[in-house]
Amino acid sequence: MAKKTMKVIIPIVVIVIIFLIIYGSFSGTYNKMVAMDEGVKSAWSQVENQYQRRYDLIPNLVETVKGYASHESQTFTDIATARASAGGVMQMSDELLDDPEAFARFQEAQSTLGGALQRLLVVTENYPELQANQNFMALQDQLEGTENRISVERKRFNEQVQSYNSYIRSFPKAIIANMSGFEQKSYFKAADAAQSAPEVKF
């Protein structure tokens, strides 16, 4: 009787042990994916914060430049249009990280705004009095610092995305990722000239 009982219990114990091993592996991998996903979102929020900082600096910068170069109307129109476009996507949540098209629109809007800002800065080179203005110099310093931080945060974001994407694509983690809805994130493409930080030189 005891032998029969043992024959029944042993397979059950083995099955339970195998189940616990699989469950432990699954839950550990899943939790790691969650943590890495949150890391990507956190890095992205820092990118957005710096873009928001630049976005907020532009009105003061434009107003200061207008005081010395009021006839540069096309430049002001371009930057106002670009800023409005960027503002339209600025408030998007981190859900855009799972939407490549929305992510591309965000990048395009920021690229356009960066290009318009670059043209504004080029215009100011023709106004020596503006370059000596204390308020303008302070805004220049803030803008330069912000552009540098944007570059740094984009790099950190891409590093987080690379780690996350590599993790969820490796086997057998890819199976768990597919089952749990973890998808690859888009990289921030900063190769275009328009995406590089505007040079603030006077």
Image: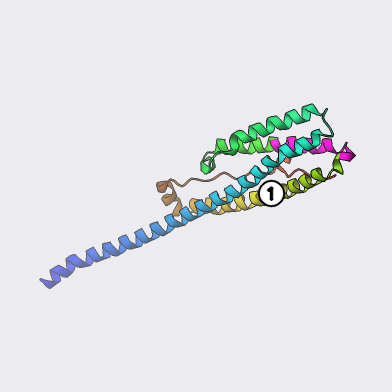
- The amino acid at mark 1 is Ser
Residue drawn at point x = 22 percent, y = 67 percent: 10
Q: Quadrant of residue 110?
A: top right
Q: Is residue 88 above or below residue 25?
A: above
Quarter of the rendering occupied by the C terminus: top right
The x, y position of residue 76, in whole percent, is 76, 30
Tell me if 88 is positioned left or right of 38 in this view.
right
Tell me if 113 is positioned left or right of 200 in this view.
left
For this orientation, the residue located farthest to the right is: 128
Residue drawn at point x = 43 percent, y = 47 percent: 178
Residue 124 lies in the magenta stretch? yes
Residue drawn at point x = 46 percent, y = 47 percent: 182
Q: Which residue is mark 1?
A: 151
- The residue nearer to you, when weighing 172 against 94, is 94
By secondary structure, the bulk of the magenta-drawn segment is best described as helix
Residue 47 lies in the magenta stretch? no
The x, y position of residue 92, in whole percent, is 55, 38
Residue drawn at point x = 17 percent, y = 70 percent: 6
Tell me if 202 is positioned left or right of 76 in this view.
right
Mark 1 secondary-structure assignment: helix
The x, y position of residue 9, in whole percent, is 19, 66
Q: Is residue 66 above or below residue 57?
A: above
The x, y position of residue 160, in whole percent, is 57, 53
For this orientation, the residue located farthest to the left is: 1
Q: Quadrant of residue 5?
A: bottom left
Quarter of the rendering occupied by the N terminus: bottom left
Res. 162 visible in picture: yes
The span shown in magenta is 113-129
Res. 171 visible in picture: no
Q: Quadrant of residue 185?
A: top right
